[in-house]
Amino acid sequence: MTESKAFASKQAILVGWIGTLLIRVAVPAWIIFGALQKALGGTPKSLPRSILDAGSTFGINDHFLVLASLVSIEFFFVAFMLFSPKFAKLSGIVMLGIFLLVLSVEMFGYGNFESCGCFGEKSMSPMAMFAIDFSLLLGIILIKPRPSNGALSKGNRSLLLIATFTVIAGVFTFNSVLNRKTIDTTTDGVTQTNLPASWYPKDIGDWIGKDIHSIDLFSWVKEWPHDISDGKQYVIFYSLTCDHCEALLWEYFEFLTVPTTLVAIPQSTDGFNYDGAFENPCMDCDTTELLIGTDWIIGTPLLVAIDNGIVKCATENENYEAPACLVH
């Protein structure tokens, strides 16, 4: 009987340590890694589209401000996990629960199963992130951490450490992100006073039936190689390293039947990165590019079918296997 109690006691201690390491080390390290990647990257591209739409709903159209604020909030919850044993578990549950909610909206509300932006521009799929976050949440709910009587938990030390960590992390985040917001709005000697710091096509469905000259995105193209208001044409906004763009061009545009203009999207506010750029199979397509300086948040390829300057169809993340806007 005594041996059984001793074994049970050792088992409880082991489980307690596992719970402590999970909520005080593993989960905060997981969140810190993602927050650091987003802060250092400093691009709103790392935010899910649902978050950008939510910001717009509340009148916050500065995507860099939204990014800096949300990353700072992540660090705030991490501070409680690191320095407050009393609220560590609750903080972890709240943070992971929010992550799971956002991922669910992205996947099942927006149909985004490609990238969640959780680790900046280069990230795992939302499904993979959901599985990891759910496993961590389940772990901290089911595994009770051992009681903590450490020196850091006594008196006001915990609150002071939380406040200090939050302030330092917040200053670092806002400085890192907002410094990336400053853009050079001069292109080829021409000042683009209406060029935004960041932009994404949140109202693409409203383009149907409109003249392209009334759509902001078309005014931010560096130079149209011909009159795109003449007859039936396609305009494809694409990334130089987009696999779906390459597949679409090889499948439908290697032998051109409708006049087509390819508009390259800069990968960053600094311009184009030609490493890994695919070979363009459309030799007869006209080419141009969007102006450099804006953080373009566009799901590629963005295919627009126009007829005499009027938009007939527009699809972001056009499906190259069954394209919706190839209307001859």
Image: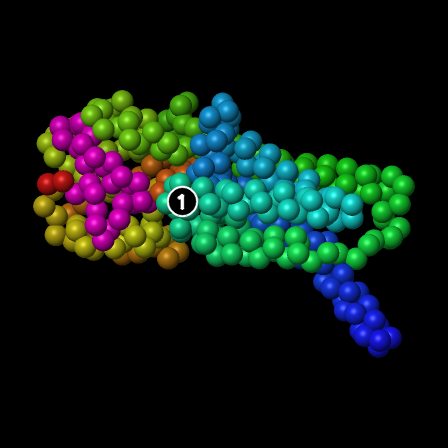
Q: Is residue 220 visible?
A: no
Location of mark 1 (residue): 108
The spot of residue 125 in percent (x, y) is: 45, 54
Q: Quadrant of residue 73?
A: top right
Name the secondary structure under disc 1.
helix
Q: Which coloring applies here?
A: rainbow
163 displayed left or right of 240 = right
Residue plotted at (64% across, 57% down) = 139
Q: Residue furthest front?
A: 1
Numbered range of the magenta stretch: 300-326
Q: Quadrant of residue 243?
A: bottom left
Vertical order, 271 against 185 (above or below): below
Mark 1 residue type: Phe
Vertical order, 219 against 23 (above or below): above
Q: Quadrant of residue 310?
A: top left
Magenta residue check for 306: yes
Vertical order, 134 against 163 (above or below): below
The spot of residue 95 in percent (x, y) is: 62, 44
Residue plotted at (40% across, 23% down) = 194
